[in-house]
């Protein structure tokens, strides 16, 4: 799996003439020049910033909403609770493109077109995150819940002072999943954003291909943009690999 990434990295260091010719793929001498060109000449720094802001907002918003939803589903009694949870899971069966037209109409009617609100608000509700947190909360011993009730701890205090401290590993792992998911969004930003100043990196790579002039696609520049786009989620995986593995480990028990 690392071979395509290695090829992209090597290509990003070459000059265009070397790439078009048949030869070995040794590291080239144009790495600094190519990466500097991408960042300064093709607006890629703006794309990176937009992707980072979008991803952070989505992660924080999803965690907040999903924590409250999982808390209600596990620890509250209300009519049709199981049906409500099944309806939440049912949304996972809906293909994303099917939701684009009604979602696009709602976003444009609200006046959010071509804004950060359009990029983030539709992603704040997450059935996957609710499911993962619900499963984790169910694994917490009932004795802790009963003790909290005896101590008179309310629902929000129980969430903040008991559940969240006991779920740090799970929350870190889920956050990595959500960050990578948000960072890799392509189709929705392509549909809802038409200003390059508001665009994200995944679409930016496509724009990078279209912006290159002289009628010849400069693969070294495109691959440099792809490698830059890869770095943030890769760093997130490396930094939080342990809680990420623990997150999936909990679900396998």
Image (spheres, helix red, strand yellow):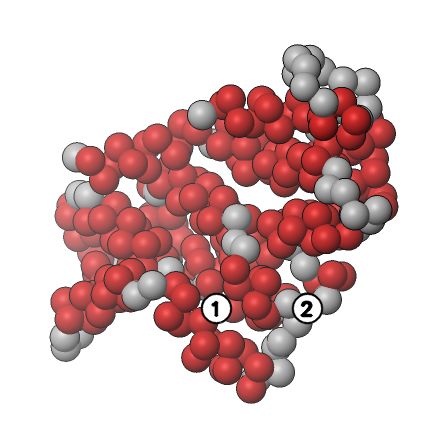
| Residue 206 image position (x, y, % from top left) | 65, 51
Is residue 234 toward the left or the right of residue 125 in the image? right
Could you tell me which secondary element the residue under label 2 belongs to?
loop
User: Is there any visible trace of residue 155 in the rendered image?
Assistant: no
Frontmost residue, 23 versus 66? 23
Picture quarter with the N terminus: top left
Frontmost residue, 249 versus 19? 19
Q: Outermost residue, bottom direction?
A: 109
Mark nearest the camera among 1 and 2 is: 2
Q: Which residue is drawn at 51% across and 77% down?
A: 104
Q: Which residue is drawn at 84% across and 46% down?
A: 214
Tell me the crowding category of disc 1: few under 14, some 14 to 19, or many 20 or more residues within 10 angstroms, Cα based.
some
Assess whether mark 2 and mark 1 are in contact (beta carbons under 8 angstroms). Answer: no
| Residue 212 image position (x, y, % from top left) | 78, 47
Is residue 156 toward the left or the right of residue 60 in the image? left
Is residue 210 toward the left or the right of residue 124 in the image? right
| Residue 54 image position (x, y, % from top left) | 60, 57
User: Is there any visible trace of residue 200 in the rendered image?
Assistant: yes
Q: Distance between the residues labelled 1 and 2?
A: 17 Å
Give the mark nearer the N terminus: 1 vs 2.
1
Picture quarter with the C terminus: top left
- Residue tagged by mark 1? 122
Q: Residue at x 66, y 72 (%)?
A: 114
| Residue 43 image position (x, y, % from top left) | 79, 50
Label ID, residue 194? 2
Tell me where residue 156 sits by quadrant. bottom left
């Amino acid at each position: 799996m690392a071979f395509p990434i290695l090829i992209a990295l090597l290509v990003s260091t070459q000059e265009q003439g070397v790439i078009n010719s048949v030869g070995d793929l040794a590291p080239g001498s144009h790495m600094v020049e190519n990466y500097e060109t991408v960042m300064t000449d093709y607006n890629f720094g703006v794309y990176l910033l937009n992707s980072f802001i979008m991803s952070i907002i989505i992660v924080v918003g999803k965690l907040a909403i999903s924590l409250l939803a999982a808390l209600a589903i596990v620890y509250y009694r209300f009519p049709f609770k199981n049906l409500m949870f099944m309806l939440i899971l049912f949304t996972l069966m809906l293909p994303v493109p099917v939701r684009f037209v009604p979602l696009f109409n709602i976003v444009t009617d609200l006046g959010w077109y071509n804004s950060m609100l359009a990029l983030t608000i539709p992603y704040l509700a997450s059935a996957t995150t609710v499911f993962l947190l619900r499963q984790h909360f169910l694994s917490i011993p009932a004795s802790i819940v009963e003790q909290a009730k005896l101590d008179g701890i309310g629902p929000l205090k129980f969430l903040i002072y008991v559940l969240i401290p006991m779920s740090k590993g799970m929350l870190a792992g889920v956050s990595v999943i959500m960050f990578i998911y948000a960072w890799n969004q392509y189709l929705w930003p392509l549909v809802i954003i038409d200003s390059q100043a508001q665009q994200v990196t995944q679409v930016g790579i496509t724009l990078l291909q279209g912006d290159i002039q002289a009628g010849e696609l400069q693969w070294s520049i495109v691959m440099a943009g792809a490698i830059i786009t890869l770095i943030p989620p890769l760093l997130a995986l490396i930094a939080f690999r342990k809680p990420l593995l623990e997150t999936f480990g909990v679900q396998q028990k």
